Amino acid sequence: MLINSKHNLREQISYAGGLTKPMIADIRNTDVSKVQHYFAQNNINADFQDNKFLAWATAKVFDIIKALYQNFNLKPGLPNNILVKDTNALCIPNLESTYGFCNLVPCKIHKGSDEVTPAKSIIFNKNFPWHKIDEISDFDFHDAKNTTTDFFLESIIHEFGHIFHENNLLKKFSIKEVLKKLLAMTDPANIQTYQQRYGQLVADNLCRYATKEPLDLIACDMSKRVIANLDRENLTPVNNPFINSPYENLFALKRLFRNTDEIDLLIKQIYDGKTEILNAN
């Protein structure tokens, strides 16, 4: 998720991104090695490069997802890896101001290395000013209009949203077909069509960042729904965030009995990999 506010953040901002004093105390006391072991016990390889905030916050998001499994019988999917990387060592351009990104297919992303980063890998930017995440979250929502909420966990839930999306595609299609659909949703010509055809609709209903490409439409919407149904003090879900949403199994059936917003129809199509809607003709 690429945000430019790192360079534009005002010194004085009066909003509140959600970090409380007890949370800050927990972060300071976080044992990163224990968090990494916790993820390993759940079959997720994690390397936080001693970043206490990312270790603590990502574990909280993981616990939120586990609660969705237990309380609402939802299985949105989990990453294989959660890593913190120096983006200067990666061959992907324009990562200086990124929170992080999700590597959805196995590929080589390290400069001068044949190391293959596995699919379903969430990678956070080691050099991002995470100590200012509360203020940056405020700015990106209130000033830049780049996020769907001002909550400090949005950027992390956003990356998990990409995993949820890929997991849904893998339930419906073969790996080969999923690869084709992911390539179609990241093809520059298709992105241009998406922006021209749906950009205003998406910006009006979600945020500017969701207009970047179809994959970010889903990740932005997912993070919005999850955060809207959180107890923000205890960081636990209080309602099923996907009830009456495009992600619900009964969405198509319920459409027969109620009016459906245009944005929800678009989300459903992208979520289910109907890339034909991105064709220029």
Image (cartoon, helix red, strand yellow):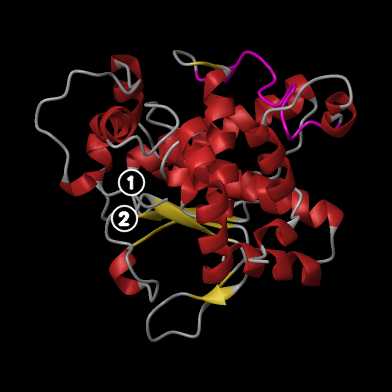
- Judged from this view, the residue extending furthest toward the left is 11
Q: Nearer the viewer, residue 159 or 30?
A: 159
Give residue 233's position: percent from left, percent from top. Answer: 44, 13
Within-10-Å neighbours for mark 2: few <14, some 14–19, many 20+: many
Task: Report the residue marked by disc 2.
Answer: 126
Q: Nearer the viewer, residue 255 or 227?
A: 255
Examine the image and state in which quarter residue 68 appears. Answer: top right
From the viewer's perspective, is residue 270 above or below residue 11? Answer: below
The amino acid type of the residue labelled 1 equals Asn
Give residue 246's position: percent from left, percent from top. Answer: 73, 33
On residue 51, the disc is: 1
Question: Dot 2: what SS?
Answer: loop
Q: Nearer the viewer, residue 151 or 41?
A: 151
CA distance for labels 1 and 2:
8 Å
Question: Dot 1: what SS?
Answer: loop
Q: Looking at the rendering, in which quadrant would you find the C terminus?
A: bottom right
Give residue 162's position: percent from left, percent from top. Answer: 59, 49
Residue at the image position 22 percent from the left and 36 percent from the top: 132
Magenta-drawn stretch, dominant element (helix, strand or loop):
loop
Residue at the image position 53 percent from the left and 49 percent from the top: 216
Q: Are marks 1 and 2 in contact (CB under 8 Å)?
A: yes
On residue 263, the disc is: none
Task: Tell me: 22 left or right of 12.
Answer: right
Examine the image and state in which quarter residue 129 appears. Answer: top left
Segment tinted magenta in the rendering: 235-249
Whether residue 39 is visible, yes or no, is no
Is residue 203 magenta-colored?
no
Give residue 189's position: percent from left, percent from top. Answer: 55, 70
Within-10-Å neighbours for mark 1: few <14, some 14–19, many 20+: some
Is residue 247 magenta-colored?
yes
Residue at the image position 30 percent from the left and 22 percent from the top: 25
The amino acid type of the residue labelled 2 equals Lys
